[in-house]
Amino acid sequence: MELPRLERGSELLRPGALLDLRERLRVLSRQHALGTVIACAFDHRTRMLPFIYADLRMAPAGVRAVGSAMLDSGFNKTRIVLQQWNRNFRPSLMDIDGRVPDIFMVSSMQIHSAECEALIRDACRIDAAHRPLIIAGGPKTIYEPWGVFSSDPHDPWGADVAVTGEEYVFLSLIERLLTLRGRSESMRSTFLRARDGGLLDDIRGLVYSRTNAAGAAEELVDTGVQQLVGDLDELPHAALGYGILEAPSRKHTLSSQPLAANMVKRFSPVSSLVLTFGCKFACPYCPIPAYNQRQHRVKSGARIAEEMNRINDEYGVRHFFGADDNFFNDKDRTLDIVETLARARHDSQMTTRRSRFRWATEVTVHDTLQLQEHLSLVRGAGVRALWIGVEDMTATFIKKGQSVDKTSEAFQLLQARGICPMPMMMHHDTQPLYTPGKPYGLLNQARLLRKAGAVSLQVLMMTPATGSTLYEGAFTSGMVYESVAERPVEQYMLDANYVVASEHKQPWKKQLNIMVAYLYFYNPIRGLIALVRPKSRLYLADAGMQFLGMLGLTQTIRRTLGWAFRLMRGNIKRATKPPHSKIPMRSIDGQAASHALPGTPQPNFVPLKVAVETQTKIRPASLRPTDSKNPPARTERPTAVD
């Protein structure tokens, strides 16, 4: 159930394509004073280990990237709203510069689907005459785009279009609509006209609905899998998005001004940054390689250093987290980046140690050992912690070049160089809590990791991920739960903290095993020992992670203990097929949609007989596409009334 792979050699956009698109939009933006609000959906029921602290204290990179792209393209009336900070935000009451925005975007992960739907529903309450164009994006729509469209004809809420790709896709959509937009025409009206005329079908990475007279979706049209930007230096600057964050509040509406620059560090002391994309391992439980079309994409070391320095200069943030799939994936590229960052950190302009940036990212055991001779350089580049995908130390269940000895060696090497090893583990059906004399049990591995120098511990239950090769089989085999003790499994429970997929006869033990492993690793005694009898130079980080771990553990137990009791009661109803769209889906030529899962109904397709050229000829002159380099003059749009 991985995303389809494009024809070999066509996976990446031509070099400079995104730069050219951004330049064209800067010209168009002078004639279109768009107002845009971008919301990041967040379900507060997901607040527990291992996401505690970072979930509220690190403004997400994805939604900031959307905001940065809008600002970079000249659309300055843009605001980013994080539900992490603004849980009472109501799109139906939003205004920007005294009017309803032209575009409302929602970005969501799968576990935040309930809040994503609520935001879209509320936006649909805006009177149709003033309703903004609603665009949905983020990981949720990459794999389940149908989830942002209602399948109930009596409740026709839904986004206007889902973006299943990155910045290039939604910027291409904006460009196309602006070239078609008539004077005083709303963006949503332009979109509907472009949609009905088939004028969006050549933009890869969109899913839009065709609706009936009542506004209910009758079919979804999938324009295909996106092409990717190969050189990440082409992306808009990461610092831009911080300047348009909505300040935390309990209000339903937006503030007149975004969060002040000198307050950003207070609410987001850690900055997430895109550094690299892609991983060479093809783990069957992971959708990352297929999403990246088996490509490895990177930013240059100079660009990364410039972004870190600028964010530090403008907002005071000096701690960063690399949103990488596997930063050590390519040895030569990694060394090029860390060598550049090491030089940047010791630049003469950075006069004090406290002004130097520090950062962390994700790697694997195998690649850490491949770079063992360069780990001192890695620390010199500012790396202070590495989240390591160990999964299973014995490699019995998952094999990525790790073993008990190799994992211990890698952790000890990192500890010796002042880098915190942060293991990420997966618990599964065949793994017991404890195995006498063998390193297979979950507690055995937690003990070995701690002994080797692990500063934190992440333990998640093996759960099928959308977009992975194991996804469909997990459902058809009956492994996935539909409900337990008459309580349905909800989307927010798919973060792998809950046991929602298991063939174990006593699945409640799996749920309790996770709690016990966390209790073994995070407890007051271990926290006190970290301070009183430190075993390494990382004792302060160790003690700090113990505190955060215990705080997160209380939330984990509070939220998942009741689920464990339900698992004890039994009465488990199992799913028989993966979730799929109830709305018929098709590609632009009537074939199966790229983002459709098995079981998705396919509509009766009637080819569009009117070509794009014909549509252009019959449109009034004021509505025809224009040369983006010489757009016609436009009058100001009237102020929208709520």
Image (tube, helix red, strand yellow):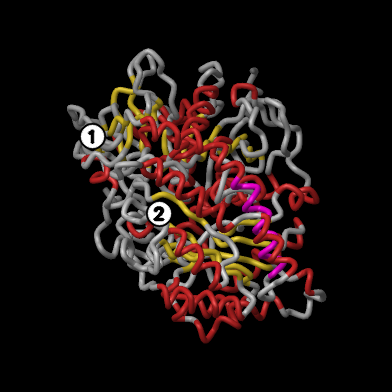
Residue 182 % position (x, y): 50, 30
Q: Is label 2 or label 1 in front?
A: 2
**Who's the residue at 55% across and 56% down the image?**
520
Residue 383 % position (x, y): 62, 71
Residue 6 % position (x, y): 27, 56
Q: Is residue 116 above or below residue 20?
A: above
Tag 1: residue type?
A: Thr
Furthest residue toward front? 436
Q: Is residue 44 above or below residue 326?
A: above
* Magenta run includes residue 218: no
**Magenta residues, as a range?**
539-553
**Who's the residue at 39% across and 64% down the image?**
436
Residue tagged 1 = 576
Tag 2: residue type?
A: His
- Label 2 sits on a secondary structure element that is strand
Closer to us: 448 or 585: 448
Which tag, 2 or 1, sits closer to the chain's start? 2
Name the chief secondary structure element in magenta. Answer: helix
Q: Residues within 10 Å of mark 1 (few under 14, many from 20)?
A: some
Residue tagged 2 = 427
Q: Residues within 10 Å of mark 2 (few under 14, many from 20)?
A: many
